[in-house]
Image (cartoon, rainbow, N blue to C red):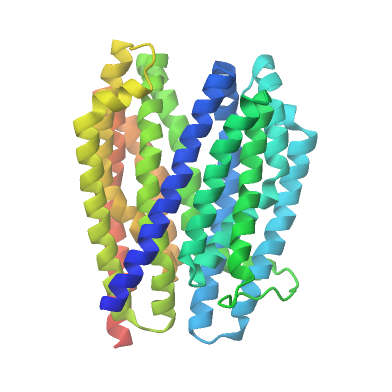
Amino acid sequence: MKTEKRLFAKYVSQNILGMVGISLYILADTFFIAQGVGADGITALNLVLPIYSVIFAVGTMIGVGASIRFAVARSRGDGDADSYFMNAILCSAVMGILLALAGFFLPDKIVALMGGNAAIVEVGSIYTKIFMSFTPFFMWNSICNAFVRNDGAPTVAMLATLLSSLFNIVADYVLMFPLGLGMAGAALATACSPVVGVLICCVHFCGKKNTISFKPVRPSVKRLLYSCQVGVSAFTGEISSGVTTTAFNFIILGLVGNTGVAAYGVVANIAIVAVSAFNGVANGSQPLISDFFGKGEMKKVQNILRYGIITSLALAAVILGAVCLWAESIAAVFNREADPVLAGYANEGLRLYFLGFLFAGINVLGTGVLSATESAREAFAASILRGFVAILVCAFGLSALLGLRGVWLAFPAAELLTLPVTVWALRKAVYRKGKRAL
C-alpha cells in the first residue's frame, strides 16, 4: 500500500501541476489579447475557441483512449499493445490535415460561420488561419502526452505540458508587443506550443525506458473506434464546456444583459483553474488504475480510487474556502472599471458556483476511473449527464425560478444530481469486479 501511495502522490502531483499550467496559459493568452488588440480581439478569440475545443477534445479522446488500451493490453501481455500508438498518430494526422486545410483556405468563412461580423472576421481570420494550420500538432501533443504518462514517465509528461505552456506565455508577449504582430503573434505562440510539447515527449521516446513502438502500422478505423470507446468521456468533458458557456451566456444575457455575461466570464475563468486541478487528479490516477486493472489487481485499483476521492475532497475544500474568503479581490482583478454591479454579480457567482466543486471533483475522477477500467458505457453516461443533460436542465429550470442566482446554482445542482450515478457506476466497475477477481 505504501508503494501505491508513493506512486499516486508522484503521478497526481505532477499531473495537477501540468493541468494547472495549461489553465494559466489560457488566462494569460486572453489577458495579452485584451491588452494588445482590445475588445474585437477578445470577441474573435471567443468565437473561434469552440473550434479549438473540438480539436483538443478529439486529440484528447484519441490519446486517452488509445493509451488506456495500450496500458491494459501491455499489462495483460497482449502483443497488439504495440499498434495503438502509431495507429492513433496516423488516424489523427488524417483528421488533422483535413481541418488544417479548411483553416488555411477558408479562415474568413469559418469566423463568419461562428458569428463574426465584418470587423471581427478581419481581426479573427489571421488567428484562425494560423492556429488551424497546426491542427495535427495539437492532436499529436495530446496523444504523445497521454502515452508518455502511461509509459511510466509522468515527469516528462508534466514538463512537456508546463514548458509548452510557459513557451506560449513568453511567446505571446514577445510576438505581440516587442514585435508588434498582434493577433498573428498570439496565433503563432499558440500554434507553436504543441510543437514544443511533442519535442519534449521525444525525450522519453528516445530514452532507454521507452516501451512505445514506432513500428509502422496500417491505419485501422476499427482500432481507432475501439480506443475512442474508453476515451469518449474525456472528449465529452472537453467539449461540454463550450456548450455550457454558450447556454449560460444566452440565459444571462436575457436576464441581466452584458454586465451579467462579464461577471460569468470572471467566474468561468477562475473555474478553469479549479477544473484543471481535478483533471490532474483524474489524469494522474488513470495510468496506475489501467495498469493494476490490466493485471487483475483490483484491491490496488480500489486503493488508488480511495486516495483520489480523499484528494479531490481536500482540493474542493481548499478551493471553495479560498474563493469565499477572497471573492471580492478575485473579481476586482477582472473589473478594471470597478463597476459595482459587475462586482456584485461576480462575488455572488463565485461563492455559489464554486459549491459545485464539492461534488465535481468526485465526478471528474469517477469518469476517469470508469474509462481506465474499460467501463466505456458507464463513463459515457456519467459524462453526458454532467456535461450536457443535467447542467442544461438545471440552468434553464433554476434560472426561470431564481433568476441569475439560479444560473449560479445550476452547476452545483447538476454535479449533485450526477454524483449518485457516478458512485453507482464506480461500485459496479471497481468493487463488484474486485469481488469477482478474488
- Indicate the quadrant where residue 23 lies: top left
Quadrant of the image occupied by residue 308: bottom left
Above or below 38: residue 265: below
Q: Residue 210 or 121: which is nearer the viewer?
A: 210
The N terminus, quarter of image: bottom left
Q: Residue at x 23, y 37 (%)?
A: 322
Which residue is most to the right? 105
Q: Residue shown at 72%/63% (left/top)?
A: 90
Q: Position of residue 125 (x, y in %)?
A: 71, 27
Spot occupied by residue 327 in the image (x, y as percentages of width and height): 25, 28
Residue 407 visible = yes
Is residue 376 depicted above or below 178 in this figure? Answer: below
Q: Nearer the viewer, residue 319 or 175?
A: 175
Q: How many marks?
A: 0
Percent position of residue 369, x then y: 38, 65
Q: Which is nearer the eye, 108 or 397?
A: 108
Does residue 348 show up?
no
In the picture provided, is 213 more to the left or to the right than 232?
right
In which quadrant will I find the C terminus?
Answer: bottom left
